[in-house]
Amino acid sequence: MALFQQTSPAPASRTQDSGAGMSLRTKWAIGGAIGGGALAGVRATGSSARAVCIRDRVTPPARQRASDQEVLAVIRDGQRQQVILAANEDTTVDGVYGFFFDGGKGHARIGRIISYSPAERTVLRDVEAVYAGDLTAARWGWWSGAVYPDPAAAGLPAEDVVIEVDRGQAPAWLVRAGGTARTWAVMVHGRGASRQEALRAVGPALELGLTSLLVSYRNDGLAPSADDGRYGLGSTEWRDIEAAIEYALANGAEEIVLFGWSMGGAICLQTADLSRYRHLIRAMVLDAPVTDWVNVLAHHAQINRIPSLVGRYGQLMLGHPLGRRLTGLSAPVDLKVMDWVSRAVELRTPTLIIHSVDDEYVPYGPSALLAERNPDMVTFEAFNHARHTKEWNVDPARWESVVKAWLRQQLAPRLNPGGIRQGSQPANAGDAATAGKRLQ
């Protein structure tokens, strides 16, 4: 899911996110910084402008997505439906996607492109399923990588469970593998998304014999909210993932694989670094993860035409105790601690990163650089034309093949003290350390 809402104005008929456009206060602050001409004025006003932008755009949970995708017509083709959509950078990419409408109460699965008219800026696509709502009555909605509304729609038998977290209980879906699974996959969705996002990964996990726990965490609309009601960008949410790991261990798990999307990747990285159970995290699979928040914030400052000096001072306010009044955070967020490109050698958990090179929200560069700086621990797999967190949607067969091949290597029986793998020929520690770099 998107880390930030787009700033272009929406037609009046759409459901408008409260943070969808740059606030008047932010525009005046930036205008004052540019027009004032004095460096002191740029610093003071820039700090406020960027902090306000962070307050309005980055840290608050997205309670309602902006309905920015127009439905032009729904037509019948025998027993099936097709939909004509306004063409844009999302709808003209082939694959399978979720489409939410009627304020999120409606959900359809949209399939292949049948035809595309660049001149008319329209695209005709298959409607594979309508899980809820009346698509024929929809006029606006939003595009999503979350294809299924729940495990049942994906053909997965699941249990509804709750995990004890700070301030209450967080609901989760539990999908058990056959037999006794000692390795569990804990799946962490991204900012503004929900556990629906993780359903795409449960099939490959089951094939590998992993029981899956699809979690919710503070401020995502299902789990209890934090005291300040704002995201910590991974600096606080990891505690809820630690609670999920504790639940898994109490219910038969012996080791953990973390899956994370977007900000969920940042949360997984913090969990592997800080959790008291970090020694039990066998591997991580991260899809379009935030590995360097400074890079992401700078990218969005550029998109929103915020001067770089303003952006740098805003980032300072995010991590400074004096900035709490402007950002709305109850505690500062240390962006340096979450800069895994700079901390690359400190990452000791085998990690697969899948990232599209045209990701419009989280630039792929830091992911590639992290793998370059720590090749023994990090494997980078690039996709093309998938945009943000939709690599599976564009090519599910490839995504699943890459994940399964890499995890099979990571989950192979470990070396015993004598240096022999159970059921295999002798191997050395170097082979084990570099296994993550070789995809079959």
Image (cartoon, rainbow, N blue to C red):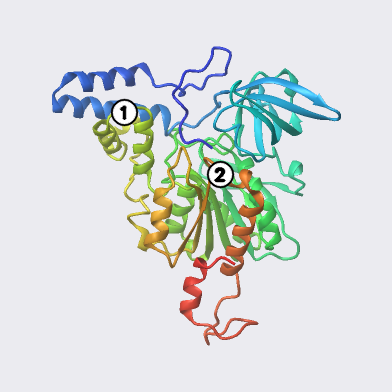
- Amino acid on which disc 1 is placed: Ile
Separation of residues labelled 1 and 2 (CA atoms): 28 Å
Above or below, 147 against 436 in this view is above
Which of the 4 quarters of the picture holds residue 50? top left
- Amino acid on which disc 2 is placed: His
Mark 1 or mark 2, earlier in chain: 2
Q: Is residue 259 visible?
A: yes
Task: State the residue lying farthest toward the front.
Answer: 119
Mark 1–mark 2 CB contact (< 8 Å): no
Q: Which residue is painted at 19% across and 29% down in the image?
A: 43
Q: In what quadrant of the picture does the N terminus appear?
A: top right
Q: What label sits on residue 405 in the rendered view?
A: none
Q: What label sits on residue 306 in the rendered view?
A: 1
Q: Which residue is painted at 45% across and 54% down in the image?
A: 269
Q: Which residue is painted at 23% across and 19% down in the image?
A: 32
| Label 1 crowd (10 A; few <14 / some 14-19 / many >=20) | many
In this rendering, the label closer to the viewer, 1 or 2? 1
Q: Which residue is painted at 37% across and 34% down in the image?
A: 329
Residue 435, image x and y in percent? 52, 71
Q: What label sits on residue 189 in the rendered view?
A: 2
Secondary structure under tag 1 reads loop
Residue 44, image x and y in percent? 20, 27
Above or below, 247 against 306 in this view is below
Q: Is residue 166 left or right of residue 156?
A: left
Q: In what quadrant of the picture does the C terminus appear?
A: bottom right
Above or below, 288 against 144 in this view is below
Q: Is residue 224 left or right of residue 316?
A: right
